């Protein structure tokens, strides 16, 4: 599990392939929010970035656009 710095916070970044759905998934976990749940997950079944989708944890009251942009840039590099 890698971590990336976002505004002085260490965000855990977990990338994996889901064999059941043929998706590549990148999850972003902020220990300040929850140590076990992702804040944002980016998933992609295709080989093109245009096929990627974003899931935001429904237990949260949204995420900032700045955080989402930051996470998407990292996910794009990893995919």
Image: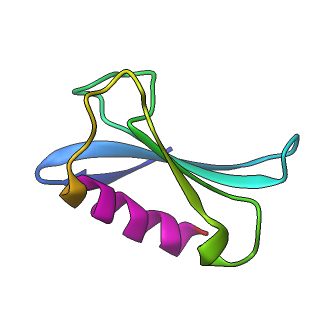
Lateral position of residue 29 relative to residue 78, left or right: left
Q: Could you tell whether 11 is left or right of 6 in the image?
A: right
Q: Give the residue at x 61% y 64%.
A: 52
Q: Quadrant of residue 33?
A: top left
Question: Residue 38, image x and y in percent?
Answer: 44, 33
Quarter holding the C terminus? bottom right
Q: Is residue 77 left or right of residue 22?
A: left
Q: Is residue 43 above or below residue 72?
A: above
User: Does residue 32 belong to the magenta stretch?
Assistant: no
> Which residue in the rendered view is the most extreme toward the right?
20
- Quadrant assignment, res 66: bottom left
Image point (84%, 45%), residue name: 21
Q: Residue at x 57, y 57 (%)?
A: 53
Image coordinates for residue 74, horizontal then vertical, percent? 42, 66
Q: What range is drawn magenta here?
A: 67-78
The quadrant in which residue 11 appears is: top left
* Coloring scheme used: rainbow
The tally of labels here is: 0
Q: Nearer the viewer, residue 14 or 66?
A: 66
> Which secondary structure class fits the magenta region best?
helix
**Residue 74: within the magenta?**
yes
Query: Residue 59 in the image: x percent, y percent?
Result: 37, 21
User: Is residue 17 toward the left or the right of residue 78 in the image?
Assistant: right
């Amino acid at each position: 599990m890698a971590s990336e710095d976002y505004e002085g916070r260490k965000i855990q970044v977990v990338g994996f392939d889901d064999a059941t759905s043929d998706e590549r998934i990148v999850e972003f976990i902020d220990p300040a929010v929850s140590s076990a749940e992702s804040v944002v997950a980016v998933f992609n079944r295709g080989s093109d970035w245009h096929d990627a989708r974003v899931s935001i944890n429904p237990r949260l009251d949204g995420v900032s656009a700045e955080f989402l942009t930051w996470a998407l840039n990292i996910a794009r590099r990893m995919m």
